[in-house]
Amino acid sequence: MAAAAATTVVANPLAGRPEVWSPYTRAPLELHRRLPQYQATRLLSAPRLAERHGVGELLIKCEMSRLGLMSFKILGASWASYQAVAGHIGREPGPWSTVAELAASLEGLRPFALAAATDGNHGKAVAHMARLLGFEARIFVPEGTAPARIEAISDEGASVTVVAGDYEDAVARSAEEAGPRCLVISDTSWPGYERVPRWVIEGYSTMFWEVDDRLQATGRRAPDVVVVPVGVGALAAATVNHWSRHEVAPTIVGVEPLGANCVMASALAGQMVTVPGPHRSVMAGLNCGRPSAVAWPLVSAGLRTLVAVDDERARRAVRDLAAIGVEAGETGAAALAGLSALQARGGAVAADATVLVLCTEGPTDPAEWRRTLGVELV
Ligand SMILES: Cc1ncc(COP(=O)(O)O)c(C=O)c1O
């Protein structure tokens, strides 16, 4: 009984043929290539975990170190910030080939700020981008955010405000910052605010272009199944937008925490709904109560299976990844936890399937990560 309560797996009743976005180009990847420390992140094949989970091949896209940060979020934050700034000045910045040249070309804008709400990673990414551009950053976090995550954002030179309430309250507060000298760079959308979250989704495409290129270079075929962690659904939307255009589109599985499973609840309700907080999962990046409206059309049609997992399963996935040398935080390990939940429920994924799991962050709360692994600093 306890195991059943700890996992929910549903076939998405809204699944169909998603309407992918057009045009779809590698322009975000071209921007990312010009940012400091760009390199394609690792794509691992994990035979031991594949065997354990009863699948043919398990591929892990490792986003624990991305453009100098510990999660994939900088891909969306950088592309969206760049596009928003270009929109603000009415032209493409530059010409530039280094970030220093880009920042110099924006001299006339200062003082200028970027603002965002965050559970941790997106805010850190926006703050980082603001610093690269020579702007201020104003970041809003919900109460209960781990001190390590707040510190990581402050380390980028950002001001961090703790907002009473949940992630949604932090989003509402950040929106008040919009003005002639401040752009709000949100990864979720609300009525009248859709362009920036759309750019965030476009920015995530870099991860998938890299997977395509790596699969091609190593003579592998596209995965049969892609498993993606879901907060507001922006990453899931990018996943659907990329993989649904492949000749044989993979089955895409979305994984949320129990209690913050807003995409699953919305799919079952037939429309976007809010899952009330407080959301206190250890998978902090997924503690979201409402899907992003911009992401919803892709997510609702493109995710075939929806899985909600409890914290214990996420912790187990952290340990499984650590055992093969992959240092992932709980949010980062959520997709693997989702695969394990799926397979525990009768092996929904075929034994010869190639499964791509998105491992989206490193240990962004190191104290929690050490507790999960059963070690403490002395
Ligand atoms: C590490 C990590 N993975 C996955 C997600 C989920 O992304 P989305 O909110 O776009 O669904 C987040 C969101 O913050 C995150 O920080």
Image (tube, grey):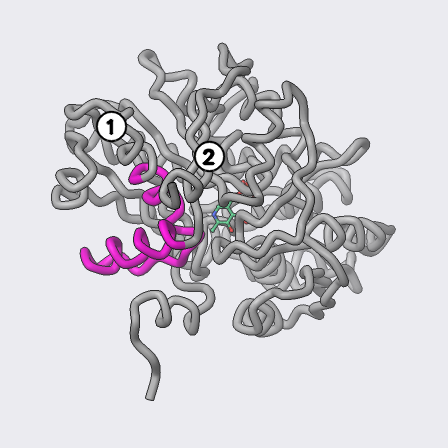
User: Circle 2 sits in a helix, a strand or a loop, which is it?
Assistant: helix
Please name the amino acid that badge 2 sits on: Ser
Percent across and percent down for residue 151 are: 57, 74
Please name the amino acid that badge 1 sits on: Gly
User: Circle 1 sits in a helix, a strand or a loop, which is it?
Assistant: loop
Q: Quick check: can you spot residue 336?
A: yes
**Residue 214 is one of the magenta-drawn residues:** no
The answer to whether mark 1 and mark 2 are in CB contact below 8 A is no
Vertical position of residue 267 compared to residue 210: above or below = above
Query: Tag 2 or tag 1, which sits nearer the N-term?
Result: 2
- Relative placement, left or right, of 304 versus 78 is left
Instruction: Please give the name of the residue rendered at 50% of the width and 39% of the height, measured from the top-left corner.
Output: 230
Q: Which of 378 and 29 is in front in this view?
A: 378
Per the picture, the main secondary structure of the magenta-coloured stretch is: helix
Magenta extent: 312-340
Q: Quick check: can you spot residue 103?
A: no
- Residue 205 numbered mark, or none: 2
